[in-house]
Image: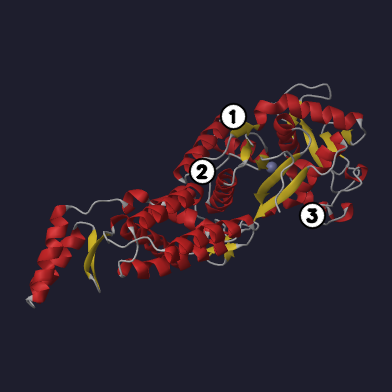
Amino acid sequence: MFKPRKGKNVNLFVCGPTVYDYSHLGHARTYVAFDCFVKYLKQAGHKVFYLQNITDLDDKIIARAREKGVGPKDLALAFEKEYLKDMKALGVSSVSKYARATAHIKEIISQTARLIKKGCAYEIKEDGIYFDISKFRNYGKLAGRTALDAEDSVTRIDYSSKKRNRGDFCIWKFKQQEEEPSWKSLFGEGRPGWHIEDTAITEKFFGPQYDIHGGGRDLLFPHHEAEVSIMESISGKSPLVRYWMHTGSLTVGGQKMSKSLGNFILLNDFLKRWQANYLRFFVAKNLWHSPVDFSESVMIEVKSAVNKVEEFLRKVKTQKSKAKNSSATAKKIKDFKNNFYAELADDFNTPKAFAVMFDFIKDTNKLLEKEKISKKEAVEIYKFFEEINKIFGFIDFKKVNKVIPAKIKKLAQDREKFRQNKEWDKADHARKEIEKQGYTVEDTSSGPVVKSL
Ligand SMILES: [Zn+2]
């Protein structure tokens, strides 16, 4: 069972973006999953501090800025703005604080100095300060690796033939070129490495230990392993965090997204085709740590599932039956609420919670059709779906509450009259007219029902 370090307070850190390009679907998956999770924790009575870093300086940013002939700072600021815009469009609103790396240089320098003092870091002349992984006894404990097979941790910034161990990583890079942003420090002018940025930021806001660290699965090694090594070496306290949460990967059409395969989907392109609430449903209906595959056909299913929920709520909202409250229905509603939250409490099992929800909708639809739901029960059901939506945000309540204009209702009545008189052409014409206005009419056992498309 989830147990935070201090009462109901939860300190959560999730690795944010490196702002050198637009966000893609993989980012959306991770950040929507954590947004739902945090909103769930709050619903469950926790007080959550959700911290996210923004990597606004690194090799990729410097390279991209050079390509475009702009300053690295301007490039990072522009893409940070795009990132925040995308998150807003997705309804990601639970982050308490976005912390830029360049706003925490003082903290990064302090951590580097402490690592040098403890003998955990060393200097390579004209290159930088490196973390010595052989000095951290538990190196590899998170990812289940040893220092010997750490060579795949080497990125461009970490490359040096003079390193003591192949897996050693750079925590401070000395200034190499004039146009690079740099800061003065006692151990030389330069800029921070990537991993230390997170530990410096989390130490500032949370101290040396906190509750949950999240991020995409691909960050487990070497990035998160490095964070554990840095922070636990500095503080001597273990573990760095109580819980690690790694979101599963996202593939498109069964393959890893790549520009060369042509299956790379930027978020702003996606949002031109699909509503943001459909993406939230797509993320939430999958288990957060499982891999997911995105495709157009999956989105068509998602759209139909969301519409089903919205249509159900419209029926609940507009039902006019004179049924009395029944103890069987009261129990059904109570079980639904309990079972829904029980699934979420079980390692945030959203697919199972959603299955509970759809079972409830199926059963209740039958009762609605027989006019067996009382007014009070309808209000309670509707309110619970509003609560669900505070966490998941996949229901478009504006659509649910959209009033069908009198003109459309009249057309539907005319159509019904034509049908009864077997004037099929006229009935067909009325239906087409209704559809032209963005509505559709469905014939049910209790008569025709107008819906918005
Ligand atoms: Zn990170």
The quadrant in which the C terminus is found is bottom left
284 to 81, vertically: above or below: below
- Pinpoint residue 12: horizontal percent, then vertical percent: 66, 41
Mark 1 highlights which residue?
73
Residue type, mark 3 in image: Ala
Residue that lies at the very extreme toward the bottom in this rendered image: 422
Mark 2 vs mark 1: in front: 2
Residue type, mark 2 in image: Val
Question: Is the CB of mark 3 within 8 Å of ligand 1?
Answer: no
- Pinpoint residue 83: horizontal percent, then vertical percent: 52, 40
Of residues 374 and 204, which is closer to you in this image? 374
Q: Residues within 10 Å of mark 2 (few under 14, many from 20)?
A: many
Label 3 with label 2: CB-CB less than 8 Å: no
Real-space CA distance between mark 3 and mark 1, rounded to the nearest whole angstrom: 33 Å
* Number of the label disc, if any, that sits on residue 300: none
Real-space CA distance between mark 3 and mark 2, rounded to the nearest whole angstrom: 29 Å
Q: Secondary structure at mark 1?
A: helix
- Pinpoint residue 128: horizontal percent, then vertical percent: 82, 33
Q: Is residue 223 visible?
A: no
Real-space CA distance between mark 2 and mark 1, rounded to the nearest whole angstrom: 25 Å
Mark 3 vs mark 1: in front: 3
In which of the image's four quarters is ligand 1 placed? top right
Earlier sequence position, callout 2 versus callout 1: 1
Q: Secondary structure at mark 2?
A: loop
Residue type, mark 1 in image: Lys
Mark 2 highlights which residue?
92
Residue at horizontal 44%, vertical 67%? 297
Q: Is residue 8 left or right of residue 40?
A: right
